[in-house]
Image (cartoon, rainbow, N blue to C red):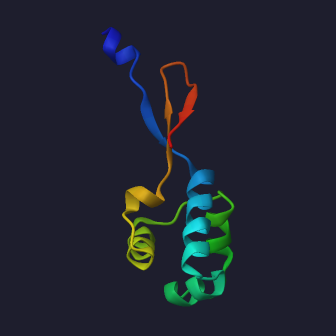
Amino acid sequence: MNRITNLSRPVLDVESTGKKIKSLMDASGITVRQLQSIFGFDYPQAIYAWLNGRNLPTVDNLIVLSELFGVTIDEIIQKKYADSQGSYQLTA
């Protein structure tokens, strides 16, 4: 039982994921407008929401991003760990 109470659980870090997408865009020289075109979005608000840590891309959009940047989805999605008391520890 002690093992379960001390278990850390991964939690998606929306803000860090947005920063990761931004850094991948910068490294690839891809702009928001280019992503908007690739995804076929009428407006760029969804992309800005990702970059600003308000929302995460959907799974199908994560697949496109991973192919576009040549990384795995795990490299895009950032996580932190919550312990049984609800404290968070960021991952590198």
Quadrant in the picture for residue 31? bottom right
Q: Quick check: 79 above or below 61?
A: above
Q: Is residue 25 left or right of residue 58?
A: right
Quarter of the picture containing the N terminus is top left
Depth order, front residue of 56/80: 80
Depth order, front residue of 64/40: 64
Find residue 39 and report its horizontal and vertical position in percent.
50, 84
Most distant residue in the front direction: 27
Find residue 12 and report its horizontal and vertical position in percent.
50, 46
Q: Is residue 55 left or right of residue 63?
A: right
Q: Quick check: 9 above or below 1?
A: below
Q: Quick check: 26 above or below 33?
A: above
Query: Which residue is drawn at the image coordinates 42% and 27% (left, top)?
Result: 8
Quadrant in the picture for residue 75? bottom left
Query: Which residue is drawn at the image coordinates 56% and 60% (left, top)?
Result: 20
Find residue 16 and report its horizontal and vertical position in percent.
60, 52
Find residue 59 and report its horizontal and vertical position in percent.
40, 65
Q: Quick check: 40 above or below 85?
A: below
Most distant residue in the top direction: 2
Query: Which residue is drawn at the image coordinates 57% and 30% (left, top)?
Result: 88
How many numbered marks, from 0 up? 0
Query: Which residue is drawn at the image coordinates 51% and 66% (left, top)?
Result: 57
